[in-house]
Image (cartoon, rainbow, N blue to C red):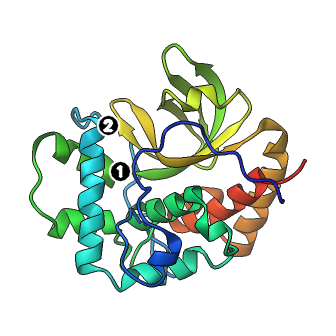
């Protein structure tokens, strides 16, 4: 497990500002998600769906994430180090400096971490943040549907910048659109990434973790073991245990097999 996990070569989209060291000592602009293991995410929570939510550009998404970061620093500064300590509990000091892990933390904080009522930071921002209209509103609607997916790659079309596969934890067909990821993955591989709706497809954001096909069996065993330890079913893992899922996949991606 000493090899560095292979990350997607695509350019990161959002969720990449700040550092874990800063996050544990002072507010840092970042995209963060639900991290509390005790948070309540019941079956009543709406499932993310691919919807036609309007047109927006990458710049609109990045501006919305910037506003999310400012919102966290302004209103939830004390929360940042708490979430960081939980997310990086199993990380070495060297790992805490890696850009891909800093990006993963911020994505988790914005879109995955939930408070005791199951509310994410992106949900709070929609309720309490500044009024947003037009394309930025469409980008915010997409961010509100962000989810962590573990995709089994079935078909890669470089010309169309399209990846077709299956979300192995939700057992759903998935189409991804990313001009750089298509050059990094092959059928049989898996890709773990936060993603947002993009028309009728999904757009990966942050930094994706690439698992080669030869490591898939080891990954399945590790995920099964984690689910048993957490007393959770596989479908619950992306919503209720996103941080645990990320670290298991990250470790397997770095294994020597």
Say above or below: 190 vs 219.
above
Tag 2 residue: 51
Q: Residue at x 84, y 39 (%)?
A: 214
Q: Are marks 2 and 1 in contact (CB under 8 Å)?
A: yes
Q: Earlier in the sequence, mark 2 or mark 1?
A: 2
Question: Can residue 164 be seen in this snapshot?
Answer: no
> Looking at this view, is 18 or 253 the one in front?
18
Q: Residue at x 43, y 67 (%)?
A: 109
**Considering the image in quadrants, where does the N terminus appear?**
bottom right
Q: Which mark is residue 145?
A: 1
Say above or below: 96 vs 248.
below
Residue 189 sits in quarter = top right
Give the x, y percent position of residue 148: 51, 52
Say above or below: 216 vs 96.
above
Residue extending farthest right: 257
Q: Residue at x 10, y 47 (%)?
A: 133
Q: Residue at x 17, y 39 (%)?
A: 135
Say above or below: 23 vs 185.
below
SS at mark 1 in the image: loop
Give the x, y percent position of residue 3: 81, 54
Residue extending farthest top: 159
Question: Can residue 58 be seen in this snapshot?
Answer: yes
> Looking at this view, is 24 or 160 the one in front?
24
Alpha-carbon distance for marks 2 and 1? 9 Å
Label 1: few (<14), some or many (≥20) within 10 Å? Answer: some
């Amino acid at each position: 497990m000493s090899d560095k996990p292979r990350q997607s070569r695509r350019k990161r989209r959002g969720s990449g500002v700040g550092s874990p060291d800063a996050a544990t000592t002072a507010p840092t602009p970042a995209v963060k998600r639900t991290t509390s293991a005790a948070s309540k995410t019941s079956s009543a929570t709406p499932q993310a769906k691919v919807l036609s939510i309007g047109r927006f550009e990458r710049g609109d998404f990045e501006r919305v994430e910037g506003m999310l970061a400012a919102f966290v620093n302004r209103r939830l500064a004390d929360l940042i180090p708490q979430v960081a300590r939980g997310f990086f509990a199993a990380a070495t000091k060297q790992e805490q400096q890696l850009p891909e892990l800093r990006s993963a933390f911020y994505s988790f904080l914005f879109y995955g971490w939930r408070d005791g009522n199951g509310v994410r930071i992106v949900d709070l921002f929609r309720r309490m943040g500044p009024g947003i209209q037009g394309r930025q509103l469409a980008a915010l609607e997409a961010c509100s549907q962000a989810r962590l997916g573990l995709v089994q790659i079935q078909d890669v079309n470089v010309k169309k910048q399209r990846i077709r596969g299956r979300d192995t934890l939700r057992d759903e067909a998935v189409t991804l659109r990313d001009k750089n990821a298509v050059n990094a993955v092959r059928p049989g591989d898996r890709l773990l990434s936060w993603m947002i709706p993009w028309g009728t497809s999904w757009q990966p954001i942050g930094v994706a973790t690439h698992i080669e096909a030869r490591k898939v069996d080891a990954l399945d065993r590790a995920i099964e073991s984690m689910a048993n330890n957490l007393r959770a079913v596989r479908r619950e893992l992306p919503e209720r245990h996103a941080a645990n899922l990320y670290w298991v996949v990250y470790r397997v991606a770095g294994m020597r097999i």
